[in-house]
């Protein structure tokens, strides 16, 4: 049942990659609502799930045997946030290159696509362990991640439709499949390595939420923004509640 549930959850997340193109073709009035709702959901995801996850892993890292000889505890606890900062700088640098140089821009665009594919890979890789803590937590986590993927891909599909159709959604879907296969067939990577990878990619995700998913102030519908924030926060808090039981 664990792997059947994992496959079903991956299929749900993968469907979000393909539904995003349909959402991006809706009329502008609906797009503004989706963008406002998605911006609120993205903010909630960052502050309710991503940042607490980095803090939790940082504390666990500082309590690992021998870590006090490597660096003082406060620095060890901040290590994953420093790695997330590196992820932000790399993502932003790729965007700058894409803006200023045509050749570098093509390379940056490819790396940007690979970055989002790596995030999908980590989602799928971590799904079996999440579901093993409780199927309700796994389902709620899947709903939250699917909503995030759908809204992030909607932005990509609206701004770069050709790249999205030919590369982004294919890479995202393939990454989900590979992540689940990795979890099923190979020995899992060390928790430290997974935490470092999650922190680095989380930094890129932070940049994407605040630069791409949040709409401009003059195009924001405040009610939809609040609705997205409340909806995502509720889902994540439900998931956290189920995980503790």
Image (tube, rainbow, N blue to C red):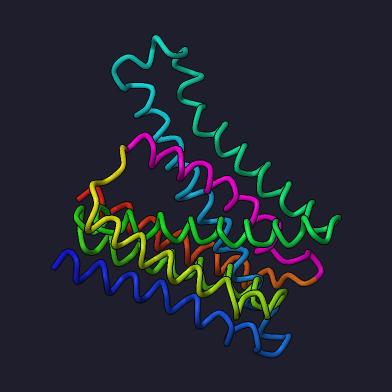
Say left or right for 144 vs 211. Answer: left
Say left or right for 48 vs 97. Answer: left
Residue at the image point whose x is 31% and y is 42% from the top? 189
**Numbered-mark total:** 0
Give the magenta-colored segment's residue range. 191-218
Residue at the image point whose x is 84% and y is 56% from the top? 101
Viewer-proximal residue among 225 and 13: 13
Which of the 4 quarters of the picture holds residue 157? bottom right
Residue at the image point whose x is 68% and y is 68% from the top? 222
Q: Is 138 placed above or below 245 here?
A: below
Name the spot of residue 166 as percent of width and height, x first: 60, 78
Residue at the image point whose x is 48% and y is 67% from the top? 231
In the orientation shown, which residue stands out farthest toward the top? 69
Is 23 colored magenta in this rendering? no
Is 216 colored magenta in this rendering? yes
Name the spot of residue 147 as percent of width and height, x first: 48, 70
Q: Is 217 placed above or below 14 here?
A: above
Say left or right for 221 vs 113. Answer: right
Viewer-proximal residue among 194 and 50: 194
In the rendered image, the quadrant that contains the N terminus is bottom left
In the orientation shown, which residue stands out farthest toward the front? 103
Viewer-proximal residue among 237 and 51: 51
Name the spot of residue 12 as percent of width and height, x first: 37, 75
Name the spot of residue 106 as percent of width and height, x first: 73, 62
In the orientation shown, which residue stands out farthest toward the right? 100
Which of the 4 quarters of the picture holds residue 151? bottom right
Say left or right for 191 vs 81. Answer: left
- Please identify the dominant SS of the magenta region: helix
Q: Is 58 placed above or below 170 here?
A: above
């Amino acid at each position: 049942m664990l792997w059947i549930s994992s496959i079903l959850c991956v299929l749900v997340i993968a469907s979000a990659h393909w539904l995003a193109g349909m959402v991006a073709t809706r009329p502008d009035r609906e797009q503004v609502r989706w963008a406002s709702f998605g911006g609120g959901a993205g903010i909630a995801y960052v502050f309710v799930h991503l940042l607490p996850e980095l803090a939790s892993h940082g504390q666990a890292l500082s309590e690992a045997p021998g870590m006090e000889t490597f660096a003082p505890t406060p620095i060890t606890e901040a290590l994953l946030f420093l790695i997330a900062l590196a992820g932000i700088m790399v993502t932003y640098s790729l965007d700058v290159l894409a803006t200023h140089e045509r050749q570098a821009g093509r390379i940056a665009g490819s790396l940007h696509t690979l970055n989002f594919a790596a995030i999908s890979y980590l989602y799928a890789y971590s799904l079996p362990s999440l579901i093993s803590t409780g199927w309700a937590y796994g389902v709620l986590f899947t709903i939250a991640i699917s909503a995030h993927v759908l809204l992030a891909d909607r932005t990509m599909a609206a701004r770069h439709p050709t790249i999205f159709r030919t590369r982004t959604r294919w890479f995202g879907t393939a990454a989900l499949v590979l992540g689940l296969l990795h979890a099923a067939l190979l020995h899992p990577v060390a928790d430290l390595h997974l935490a470092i990878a999650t922190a680095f990619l989380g930094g890129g995700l932070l940049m994407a939420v605040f630069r791409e998913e949040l709409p401009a102030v003059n195009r924001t519908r405040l009610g939809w923004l609040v609705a997205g924030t409340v909806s995502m926060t509720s889902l994540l808090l439900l998931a956290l509640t189920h995980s503790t039981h």
